Image (cartoon, grey):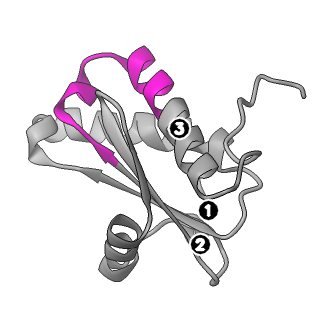
Amino acid sequence: MLPAQNRMRQASDFRGSVRGGVRAARPTLVVHARKTNSPPSRVGFVVSKAVGNAVTRNRVKRRLRHLVVPLFAGSPDVHVVVRALPAAATSPERLSDDLAQAWAQCMTRLGLTRMGADPKDPS
């Protein structure tokens, strides 16, 4: 679980990341990221009613929070918003792959190539 200081809660933070940053889309989710000058790095999640009922939405949020922790470790000053699409409720394996790919693409576009590297890769 991410520490409270790394969780995005303010609407202005969400808005700034979505409108002012880079974006990478996959079939199950969209990742928005923006460099920031105000530490610490933060991450927020958007899971709308289109994803499913409350139980399904909370399950998707729990999965996303769990999957973000290794990607978020040691990150520079960046704000990231992960927006789940309706397909996010169908396959946990696909959600994991899509998140890793979209995260890496956003970090590359921001010029932060080492952030979000595969945690299983020793290099």
Residue at image position (22%, 39%) is 57
Mark 3 belongs to which amino acid?
Answer: His
User: Residue 64: x and y, percent?
Assistant: 44, 39
**In the figure, 33 relative to 123: above or below?**
below
User: Residue 103: x and y, percent?
Assistant: 53, 42
- Evaluate if marks 2 and 1 touch, with contact meaning CB atoms under 8 Å apart: yes
**Neighbourhood count class around disc 1 (C-alpha, 10 Å): few under 14, some 14–19, many 20 upward:** few
Q: Which residue is mark 2?
A: 5
User: Residue 76: x and y, percent?
Assistant: 72, 64
Question: Between marks 1 and 3, how big is the CA–CA gap?
Answer: 12 Å
Mark 1 belongs to which amino acid?
Answer: Pro
Mark 2 belongs to which amino acid?
Answer: Gln
- Evaluate if marks 3 and 2 touch, with contact meaning CB atoms under 8 Å apart: no
Residue at image position (22%, 26%) is 87
Q: Which residue is mark 3?
A: 66
Q: Regarding mark 3 in the picture, which secondary structure is present there?
A: helix
Does the magenta portion include 19? no
Residue 27 seen in render: yes
Residue 94 numbered mark, or none: none
**Neighbourhood count class around disc 2 (C-alpha, 10 Å): few under 14, some 14–19, many 20 upward:** few
Q: Which residues are magenta?
A: 83-99
Q: Which residue is mark 1?
A: 3
Choose the circle earlier in sequence order: 1 or 3. Answer: 1
Q: Main secondary structure of the magenta part?
A: helix
Q: Quadrant of residue 110?
A: bottom right
Question: Between marks 3 and 2, how big is the CA–CA gap?
Answer: 16 Å
Residue at image position (64%, 42%) is 71
Residue 1 seen in render: no
